[in-house]
Image (cartoon, rainbow, N blue to C red):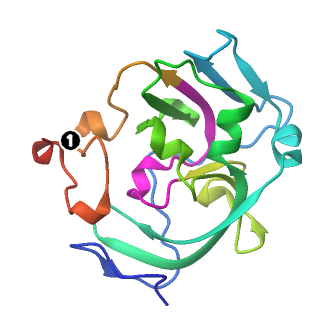
Amino acid sequence: MATGPLPPGQHLVKGWPVSHYGPVPKFRPDRWNLQVFGATATAEKYTWTFEEITALEGGTVVTDMHCASGPTSTGHEFYGVPGAALLELAPPAPEVTHVMAWAEYGYSANLRLGDLASEGTLLATHHNGEPLTVEHGFPLRLVVPHLYGYKGPKWLRALEYMTQDRRGFWEERGYHTIGDPWTGRRHSYQED
């Protein structure tokens, strides 16, 4: 059951389709960390191990997931660290306007700073009460419910604070830089 109306051009699908570009990475806990770098308020880089991330106070969001190619899957419950909480732990410099979310194999997605701070945005570790499966992003997936799925990278490894926007992986390949499904604008030629 959908948690709300569908955005323009979307259609309901059953289950939770797996969609990604490239291979599924192997989780190596001894080498894994999450970093926040770039224009931080302290000019320092922040780093957390998986154990440290999972020890942070978490939150839950129930949302639908919208793929830019048209499918919408519904009723997903995610648990993880709220984006706003991470911004408090690693504050950005005042001039930061955007964030680049970096994942395994160099995948990236650009976001406005407000998208990361938005209520509902999570660095998710769990889906429907269980740890994420590796195909769906274990150990850490960015969930930005109000944007298309390509804005929420699986296998998240870093957040880079930026003082101006830069295109991420799919944005460099013709997808819309904002990725708001409610506007129905999926492609870069539709940008203002």
The spot of residue 139 in percent (x, y) is 72, 49
At 43% from the left and 57% from the top, the residue drawn is 149
The spot of residue 72 in percent (x, y) is 39, 74
At 28% from the left and 40% from the top, the residue drawn is 177
Q: Which of 70 and 94 lies nearest the eye of the viewer?
A: 94
At 50% from the left and 54% from the top, the residue drawn is 144
Above or below, comparing residue 116 to residue 181 in the picture: above
Question: Can you see residue 32?
Answer: yes
Q: Which residue is mark 1?
A: 174
Q: Is residue 32 shown left or right of residue 76?
A: right
Above or below, comparing residue 54 to residue 3 in the picture: above
Q: Quadrant of residue 89?
A: top right
Disc 1: CA contacts within 10 A as few (<14), some (14-19) or many (>=20): some
Question: Can you see residue 25?
Answer: no
Q: Residue furthest bottom?
A: 1
Q: Quadrant of the C terminus?
A: top left
Q: Residue furthest front?
A: 94
Q: Is residue 47 shown left or right of residue 181?
A: right
Q: Which of 61 and 133 lies nearest the eye of the viewer?
A: 61
Residue 146 lies in the magenta-colored region: yes
At 42% from the left and 27% from the top, the residue drawn is 97
The spot of residue 37 in percent (x, y) is 61, 19
Q: Which of 84 and 172 lies nearest the eye of the viewer?
A: 84
The spot of residue 64 in percent (x, y) is 48, 73
- Identity, as a three-letter code, of the amino acid under mark 1: Gly
Q: Which residues are magenta?
A: 144-160
Count of labels shown?
A: 1
